[in-house]
Every structure is written in structure tokens, then in C-alpha cells.
Image (tube, rainbow, N blue to C red):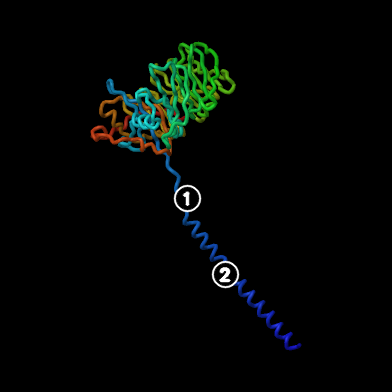
Amino acid sequence: MMQISKIALLVIIFSMLCSCIRSNESQKVGPERDETHAAVSQSKKLPPPKKSVNWLLFEAENGNMPMDFLADMDDPTGNTYIDLDDIIGKLHASEGEAYPESELYLDRFSDDGRRIALCRESTELNYLVIKIFDLSTIKKITEFKVPNRDYAVMSPDLRKCVYTEDAAFFYYINQMQKTKALGHLYDGHYLVLPVFSPDSNQFALVDSNHNILIYDLSKNKLIQQIKSGLDGIQIEQWLYNDQMVLYSNDNDKAYVLNIRTGEKKLLMKATESPVITSDNHRVAYLNLKGEIQQRDIQTGLPIKYSNVFHRIGYNASPTQWIQTTTDLMKYRKNIPAQRIVASSTLPDQAGELLCCP
């Protein structure tokens, strides 16, 4: 019995030693496995985020040959551009409908460059058809009708539309398929295109007394009136920091208006109103020679850009900045070389930037 007890005791001791050895080995192997797992995780890095392209939409004209195009303003040569007709043509083809492509024209791009609003106008129709397309998928998202009267203006997110009929203002929310009347304005015969706020919830316009009227769509009423003190003004942009860009046709000057305080500052002198990026970093404008210039707003320094179309006889004016990661180059068709070759680069022409928004 004594001998058996000794043997059992040895077995128990041996088992305990084996357990300790396995425990030590697992502690050594554990960190190695963690290190291996960490190495594998580090190798699977996320792709870098896409960089936004600074596209600028231009309206250009050469006699009886109008042309709208997008230009990459980060390309100083001016050779990276897209004919707007190429975009419209591709979207028209994606619908597979029988109406002619010539009945489509641009209303606006969404501020993020992901969508586009096109208007269809025809002598056979007594209304406008507004079509919203996704520029990534080349598919139509929705469409709706508005009375074909004075004009129809889309909001920055392309979800709302303001139009006039019999000197009364209405707004249309395309997702809800509902139209609401905003009522008659003071002198609707004089008023021109309204400008939406960046969040698309308000819009502003100028009356014949040079007052800026701000309407709230959710409250369905006029909420603010600001005296501009300027003749011949129009609202060019409503910026994200509660400021507006105003342009006076009387003195060819642009101003920045603080909506909260009513204070305005002279932005710059230019032959045409400047267009500012949504992040308020860049401004593009026509100088006194009718050449396109762009500048950094904070520093006032010029950013080189050569407008190829100006060199071949087109008068081009900037209309909308589109800062987007959406690949728009897929819409560009092959372009004849003679249309894009420039013999030299535009010298910088001083555009006097007087203040920063």
C-alpha cells in the first residue's frame, strides 16, 4: 500500500509539472500570435480618401455658338475640361426615351457634385419637366413637372424648387410631390432669380427698392428684409457662413453682406460677378480684359489658370463651383487637338481683392 501511494504521488507531481510547462508555453505563444495578428491588421490599411476636384462651370459664347463646360481649376493649362453637352448626351441616352436631346438643358449641379438637375422644355408641353440624375451611376433618380412660366430654380440639394406663376411664388418639394404657395410678393414683375440658402430651407431675392428679402420655406413667410444701399444689385451666392455675395451692375463691384448684422464690405472690382467655392477658399472672376482669374481668398494670391476657350475666341463666364469626388471625367468624349492647344499661358492680371468673406 505504501508503494502504491508513492506511485500515485509521483503521477500527481508529474501531471502538475506538465501543466506548468504548457502554461508557460501558451504565455510565450500568445504574444507571438497577437503580434502576427497585428501585423496582418496593419497590412490591411484602408485606401486613402478621394481628393475633391475643383470643377468650375462656365457659360461660353462665340457668336452664335454657345457652349457650357466644366474646367478643372487645379490644372493651370486649362486642358482638363468637359463639354456639358457630353454629360447631357450620356444622361439622355441612359433614359432610352424618344424625345430629342436638344430639349434638355442644365438647371444646376448639386453642391457636392453627386447629382444634376436637367430641365426638359418643349413646344409640345405647357410645363417644364425637371429630371434629377445621379452622376455616379448615370441613372435618373426622379422627375417632376412645374408650370412653364417665368423660371424654375432648384435648391443646392436638388430637393426643392421655387418658380413663379402670375407674379406669385411657389415652392415644390420633389420628394413629397407637393406644391405650396408662398403668396404674392411686393412687386413680382421686377424680381429676378432667387438664391437658396446652403441648407435649402430659405431663399432670398431683391425687390425694386434694392431691399434683400429672405423667405423661410418651413414657415411659409417673409422673415427678414435688409436694405442694401446699392443700385442695380443682384444676389450671386449665399455662403455657408451667413454671408451673401452681391454684385452691382452699376459699378461692376462685388460685395459681401453679413446677413446677421446687415454690414457689407467691398469684395473686389471685376467686370463680372465673382464665384466663390463652397468652402470660401477660392474666388474666380473675369478681369477687366475679360480673362478668367482665380485667387486664394485668405491670402489674395493668384492661382494660375489658362482659359483655352478664351484664346480661341469664346467669351466665358464662371457660374458655379463644384467641389466633388465624383468621377466626372468619364463623361468626357475625345476632343479634337485644335480645340485644346494653347500657344502660351495667360499672364496674371491684377483683380483687386479687397476683403475676405
Helix, strand, or loop for circle 2? helix
Q: Residue at x 73, y 88 (%)?
A: 3
Q: Is residue 336 visible?
A: yes
Near mark 1 (Cα within 10 A), the count class, few <14, some 14-19 or many ≥20, is few
Q: Nearer the viewer, residue 59 or 2?
A: 2
Residue 314, percent from left and from top = 28, 25
Residue 18, percent from left and from top = 63, 76
Left/right placement of residue 24 relative to residue 139 reads: right
Residue 99, percent from left and from top = 37, 24
Total numbered circles: 2
Q: Is residue 299 visible?
A: no
Q: Residue at x 44, y 31 (%)?
A: 140
309 above or below 27?
A: above
What mark, if any, has residue 28 been given in the picture?
2
Amino acid residing under circle 2: Lys
Question: Are the residues tagged 2 and 1 within 8 Å (C-beta)?
Answer: no
Helix, strand, or loop for circle 1? loop
* Residue at the right extreme, as displayed: 1
What mark, if any, has residue 276 been given in the picture?
none
205 above or below 8?
A: above
Amino acid residing under circle 1: Leu
Residue 315, percent from left and from top = 30, 24
What mark, if any, has residue 46 been given in the picture?
1
